[in-house]
Image (spheres, rainbow, N blue to C red):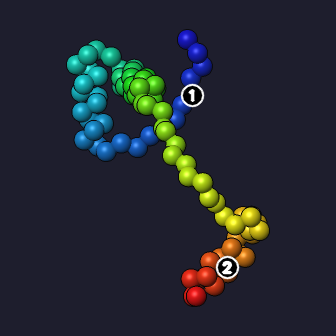
Amino acid sequence: MGSRMKTTIELPDDLLIQAKQFAAGRRTTLRALLESGLRHELNQSARAKKKRPAIKWVTVPGGPPKDWDVSDRETIMKRLLRDRAL
């Protein structure tokens, strides 16, 4: 068994009561129930990521004018506002 870390979580009262009753009905601890549920959710999430299709990026030619310094946000905003006023 690996190391364990203590933490505090806040749950709605009704959910905590329901979880304690569920754990007792299965003759297990609340800690074991929460750990099992968390592992299940993390595994489901990992499996869901694997099933997702890859994003197909669609690109078009173009971009900012060659003389624009895209790191100079202030100048770009001034040019955009100036061109908009025309």
The three-letter code of the residue at mark 2 reads Arg
Taking the image as shown, residue 51 lies to the left or right of residue 66, namely left
Residue 5's disc number: 1
83 and 22: which is toward the camera:
83
Image coords of residue 34 (percent x, y): 39, 27
Circle 2 sits in a helix, a strand or a loop, which is it? helix
Query: Which residue is at the far front?
Result: 61
Query: Which residue is at the far bottom?
Result: 85
Residue displayed at 70% across by 70% down: 73
Camera-side mark, 1 or 2: 2
Circle 1 sits in a helix, a strand or a loop, which is it? loop
Circle 1 crowding by C-alpha within 10 Å: few under 14, some 14–19, many from 20:
few
Spatial separation of the CA atoms under disc 1 and disc 2: 54 Å
Image coords of residue 9 (percent x, y): 44, 40
53 and 12: which is toward the camera:
53
Residue 15 to residue 29: above or below: below
The three-letter code of the residue at mark 1 reads Met
Residue displayed at 63% across by 85% down: 82
Q: Tell me the quarter of the picture where residue 52 sits.
A: top left
Residue 79's disc number: 2
Taking the image as shown, residue 76 lies to the left or right of residue 35, namely right
Q: Quadrant of the C terminus?
A: bottom right
- Is residue 45 shown to the viewer in this render? no
Residue displayed at 74% across by 68% down: 68
Image coords of residue 35 (percent x, y): 42, 24
Q: Quadrant of the N terminus?
A: top right
